[in-house]
Image: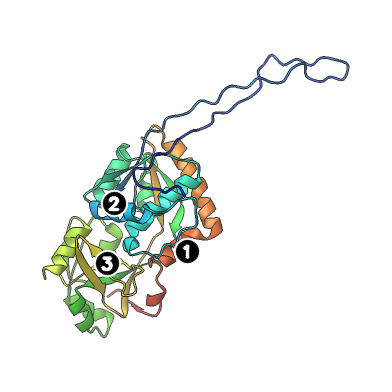
Amino acid sequence: MQHVSLLANFAVVVLLATGCTREQKPSGSDGTAASAASTREPKPVDLGKVRLSLSATDTEKYKHFLSDKKLTDTISYQSPDLDTAQVVDAVLISKALTLGGIDTDFEMVTIPNSERERAMVVSGELTVSGTSQWDWWADANTETVYKSDVVVPNGTFEKGLYTSKERAAALTVESSKDWAKFTCVSNRNWRVDWKTLSRLGFKNLQMAPNTESMFKMVDGGHADFTVQSFSGKPDLSITVGGITLYPVKGWKVALDGSRHFVVSKKNPHGAVVFAGLQKGLASMHQSGEVARALTESGFFNVNVKTWRTIQPQ
């Protein structure tokens, strides 16, 4: 089996359209063509490397997950490497591109936070954002990015309230209004998260630039919890930067909006890459693989189906 790794070498060939020459002339009593149409030799288009963004921690997980897998094969998404939504997104993008005929080197670009990631895909520094983006953002940037078909449908994005193992086990919350007394850490640039948390009545929201900083603040006691996507681990835990946090059982947060992959229009090969992404994504939707990946990885988590959703205050 040929394995896929971050540094695997692939050949990218895009076949250019071919056609008959204008010198064809009918001849003979039966009207058949005098000669077959000549064709041009297909010329390869060098896409270079498809630049895909992830944090340093998630890049390691992405690389480890794909180290013994072939993207054209059936993949199980039950893995501790897929404990963040960002890694799941990057794997789905890689597979969709491969199934869509874009065989290339994937160059992982380390990004410090989501705001920088969006700026880089808008400018063309990134070919594809390694993380799916909200519908409202993609729609507001149609001049600079292509928006894929839906990946996470509206009304299905749920997150847990993650804290230390000890606090998760000891914390007792009776009603939605009781959450207001706790300190939550998030990022203002995660606009849907920040707006939702503010609407839910959290009076003390702390700002952190990225997920690793959020985990450090919770671990250091500077915040009670952070809101993160669920993982597929049996205990639903997430590890970032060597820190493992656990969800408060029985409660979850619902976010409004749909999620999509975005490709830079500023990149010279953005249109070709986007066409391949859409083709592969359509195939994965048809086979049920997108929904299966999100379920097996824990993003759509059956274990929290009966948990209460915090209501606006």
Disc 3 marks a residue whose amino acid type is Ile
- Sort mark 1 into few (<14), some (14-19) or many (20+) by Cα contacts within 10 Å: some
- Sort mark 3 into few (<14), some (14-19) or many (20+) by Cα contacts within 10 Å: many
Asked whether the residues under the numbered discs 3 and 1 touch, taking CB atoms below 8 Å apart as contact, a structural biologist would say no
Q: Can residue 200 be seen? A: no
Locate the C terminus by quadrant.
bottom left
Disc 1 marks a residue whose amino acid type is Arg
Q: Label 3 vs label 2: CA separation? A: 15 Å
Q: Label 2 vs label 1: CA separation? A: 22 Å
| Residue 37 screen position, x and y as percent | 69, 21
Q: Secondary structure at mark 1?
A: helix
Q: How many marks are shown on the rendered structure? A: 3
Residue matched to label 2: 59
Q: Residue furthest front?
A: 1
Asked whether the residues under the numbered discs 2 and 1 touch, taking CB atoms below 8 Å apart as contact, a structural biologist would say no
| Residue 26 screen position, x and y as percent | 79, 16
Disc 2 marks a residue whose amino acid type is Thr
Earlier residue among tags 2 and 1 = 2
Residue matched to label 1: 292
| Residue for point 38% across, 42% down | 8
Earlier residue among tags 3 and 2 = 2
- Sort mark 2 into few (<14), some (14-19) or many (20+) by Cα contacts within 10 Å: many
| Residue for point 32% across, 64% down | 83
Q: Label 3 vs label 1: CA separation? A: 20 Å
Earlier residue among tags 3 and 1 = 3
| Residue 9 screen position, x and y as percent | 39, 39
Answer left or right for 230 relative to 187.
Answer: right
Q: Residue furthest right?
A: 29
| Residue for point 47% across, 62% down | 291
| Residue for point 24% across, 65% down | 239
Residue matched to label 3: 238
